[in-house]
Image (tube, rainbow, N blue to C red):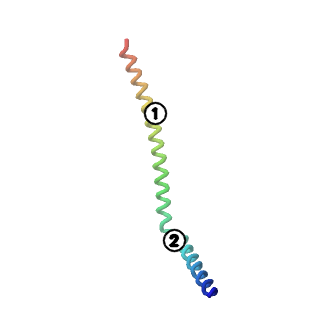
Amino acid sequence: MRHQDNLASIDKSSALSRFFKRLSADQRGASFVEYVIVVGLVAIVCIMAFGNFGKAINKKVEEQTGKISDMKTP
């Protein structure tokens, strides 16, 4: 009985190793994953750039608002 158990476990492990070999050789999903990673990185860079750009614009608007307020006050 033990011999049959060992054969069954060998068959399962070889089938599993064949499955993982086929899975690692399959490149169909790799392009999609790479595309998603690149799009995610571009989105992060854009968010950071727009955040910094927004802070710079806000600073300029506050400066100009201060200058206008100084002009109104005698």
Residue at (48%, 48%) from the top-left corner?
A: 44
* Front one among 74 and 11: 11
The residue that disc 1 covers is 56
Contact (Cβ within 8 Å) of mark 1 with mark 2: no
Q: Please state, as top left, top right, bottom left or bottom right, where the C terminus lies in the image.
A: top left
| Residue 31 place in picture, x, y as percent | 48, 63
Quarter occupied by residue 22: bottom right
The residue that disc 2 covers is 26
* Front one among 14 and 54: 14
Q: How many marks?
A: 2
Residue at (38%, 19%) from the top-left corner?
A: 69
| Mark 2: amino acid | Asp
* Front one among 45 and 3: 3
| Residue 46 place in picture, x, y as percent | 46, 45
| Residue 45 place in picture, x, y as percent | 48, 46
Residue at (57%, 74%) from the top-left corner?
A: 21
Residue at (46%, 62%) from the top-left corner?
A: 32
| Mark 1: amino acid | Ala
Within 10 Å of disc 1 (Cα), the crowding (few <14, some 14-19, many 20+) is few
Q: Please state, as top left, top right, bottom left or bottom right, where the N terminus lies in the image.
A: bottom right
Within 10 Å of disc 2 (Cα), the crowding (few <14, some 14-19, many 20+) is few
Quarter occupied by residue 50: top left
Q: Residue furthest front?
A: 1
Q: Secondary structure at mark 2?
A: loop
In this view, 67 is above or below 60: above
